[in-house]
Image: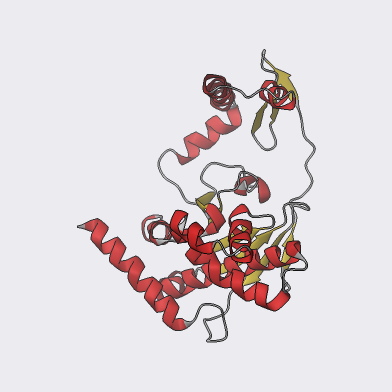
């Protein structure tokens, strides 16, 4: 894969406390609340009920409400948000963006999530909202893919097993977005090293989506001095590699014509929603 900048969060010494009957383990450094009770249920093969899961969320919210650190943050952000970052990432539960970048603060990151970090009209409009309605607008947009992505793996398997037509019926937006980088990398690397191919597909998909952002918001980005990067998160190591996005070029997976068509569709959907 291409070269990039690797960033690791500085090491932090966790101050762990255990409280209440559910043994809620909390880490004040990251503001985490984890129910050991629920973890043990899963360990022994028991599936927690919806009511039990809601109760675990109630305990977590109680910790959040009573934590002085978050009370201060709520006070600081109650009149509005001023995030520095717009980060588009996968809905995968392992991709918790504030934790990956050591930014567990309210108002720090404007997040947009979808399976496979795919940007449809809704995602584009979300970015548009952040740029046009947050003052000052965030100065960095990152589209971040990750290794071991389920959406990418599903697309890869559907092509290898020639079942992509069925998958396209079930997940048309996701498959349409990921299909081109998937085909490209299968043709380039074959299917011998599946993990490598999947990682390459995820990286190419992140680049493609970031390129889409750059094209759609070209003039606005220049006006406000906003940078666009693609990112690649390694599930195993925790590393995030950043890749600068260059201007669209016919050699790239997504051509200028495709970008123009996508931009036109996004704008049409946005306009129809305003009527």
Image quarter where the C terminus lies is bottom left
Q: Residue furthest top?
A: 21
Whether residue 141 is visible, yes or no, is yes
Name the residue at 54% across, 58% down.
117
Query: Along the line of sight, which residue is nearer the eye, 149 or 163?
Result: 163
Relative side of 197 to 77, left or right: right
Give the x, y percent position of residue 77: 47, 41
Name the residue at 45% across, 75% down.
215
Query: Along the line of sight, which residue is nearer the eye, 68 or 117?
Result: 117
Residue 1 vs 104, above or below: the answer is: below
Image quarter where the N terminus lies is bottom right
Residue 91 vs 6, above or below: the answer is: above
Residue 46 vs 239, above or below: the answer is: above
Res. 49 image quadrant? top right
Res. 163 image quadrant? bottom right
Name the residue at 49% across, 63% down.
165
Q: Residue furthest front?
A: 162
Give the x, y percent position of residue 161: 62, 62
Give the x, y percent position of residue 210: 53, 68
């Amino acid at each position: 894969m291409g070269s990039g900048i690797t960033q690791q969060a500085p090491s932090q010494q966790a101050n762990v406390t255990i409280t209440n009957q559910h043994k809620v383990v909390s880490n004040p450094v990251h503001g985490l609340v984890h129910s050991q009770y629920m973890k043990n249920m899963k360990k022994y093969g028991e599936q927690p009920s919806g009511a039990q899961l809601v109760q675990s969320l109630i305990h977590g919210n109680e910790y959040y409400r009573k934590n002085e650190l978050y009370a201060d943050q709520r006070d600081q952000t109650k009149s509005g948000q001023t995030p520095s970052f717009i980060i588009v990432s996968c809905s995968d539960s392992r991709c918790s963006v504030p934790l990956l970048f050591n930014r567990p603060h309210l108002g720090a990151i404007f997040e947009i999530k979808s399976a496979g970090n795919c940007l449809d009209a809704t995602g584009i409009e979300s970015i548009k909202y952040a740029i046009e309605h947050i003052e000052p607008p965030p100065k960095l947009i990152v589209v971040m893919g990750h290794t071991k992505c389920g959406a990418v793996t599903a697309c890869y398997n559907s092509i290898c097993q020639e079942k992509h037509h069925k998958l396209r019926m079930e997940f048309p937006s996701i498959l349409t977005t990921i299909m081109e980088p998937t085909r490209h990398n299968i043709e380039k690397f074959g299917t011998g090293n599946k993990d490598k191919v999947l990682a390459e597909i995820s990286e190419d998909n992140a680049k493609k989506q970031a390129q889409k952002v750059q094209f759609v918001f070209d003039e606005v980005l220049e006006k406000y001095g906003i940078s666009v990067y693609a990112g690649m998160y390694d599930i195993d190591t925790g590393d995030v590699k950043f890749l600068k996005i260059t201007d669209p070029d016919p050699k790239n997976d997504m051509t200028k014509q495709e970008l123009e068509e996508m931009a036109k569709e996004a704008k049409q959907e946005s306009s129809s929603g305003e009527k």
